[in-house]
Image: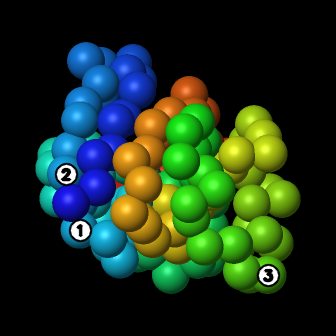
């Protein structure tokens, strides 16, 4: 099992969280499975940027992003070199530290 540490986020995960995930699951699915409600307005189909995250530790252990993911990341709010779409990023064997950005460019989330 891989340990994923989610840093505190004011609304989504105020206390932060540490979860265990099987390699091969997406960061988004691992978060959702553990009660961390990351936005995913496109139903995790790589068609928006609402699940954008920063991979603060463990980035190099992840498979490279696809061209489709890169195209959408270019539209994400607060893009940084360690940005990924959590619905497209599969957990590997190395522990991760994830930061959820303060904002997304999408004004609609699934549960609102």
Circles 2 and 1: CB atoms closer than 8 Å:
no
Q: Label 2 neighbourhood size at 10 Å, few (<14), some (14-19), many (20+)?
A: some
Choose mark 3 or mark 1, whichever is in front.
1
**Residue 106's spot in the image, x, y percent?**
60, 51
Q: Label 3 neighbourhood size at 10 Å, few (<14), some (14-19), many (20+)?
A: few
Label 3 – label 1 distance at C-alpha: 25 Å
Between discs 3 and 1, the one toward the N terminus:
1
Label 3 belongs to which residue?
Answer: 67
Helix or strand or loop: what does disc 3 sit on? helix
Choose mark 3 or mark 2, whichever is in front.
2
Label 1 belongs to which residue?
Answer: 22
Helix or strand or loop: what does disc 1 sit on? loop
Helix or strand or loop: what does disc 2 sit on? strand
> Who's the residue at 60% across and 73% down the image?
63
Circles 3 and 2: CB atoms closer than 8 Å:
no
> Who's the residue at 36% across and 35% down the image?
6
Asked if residue 23 can be seen in this view, the reply is yes
Which quadrant of the figure contains the N terminus? bottom left
- In the figure, 15 relative to 33: above or below? above
**Is 46 or 19 nearer to us in this picture?**
19
Label 3 – label 2 distance at C-alpha: 28 Å
State the mark number for residue 96. Answer: none
Between discs 3 and 2, the one toward the N terminus:
2
Residue 2 image-quadrant placement: bottom left
**Is 79 or 92 nearer to us in this picture?**
92
Label 2 belongs to which residue?
Answer: 20
Asked if residue 112 can be seen in this view, the reply is no
Q: How is the image coloured?
A: rainbow
> Who's the residue at 78% across and 69% down the image?
70
Circles 3 and 1: CB atoms closer than 8 Å:
no
């Amino acid at each position: 099992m891989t340990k994923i540490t989610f840093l505190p986020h004011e609304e989504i995960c105020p206390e932060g969280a540490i979860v265990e995930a099987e390699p091969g699951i997406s960061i988004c699915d691992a978060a959702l499975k553990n009660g961390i409600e990351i936005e995913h307005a496109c139903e995790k189909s790589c068609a928006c940027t609402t699940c954008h995250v920063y991979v603060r530790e463990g980035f190099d252990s992840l498979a490279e992003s696809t061209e489709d993911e890169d195209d959408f990341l270019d539209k994400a709010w607060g893009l940084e070199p360690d940005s990924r779409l959590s619905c497209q990023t599969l957990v590997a064997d190395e522990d991760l530290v994830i930061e959820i950005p303060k904002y997304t460019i999408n004004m609609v989330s699934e549960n609102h």
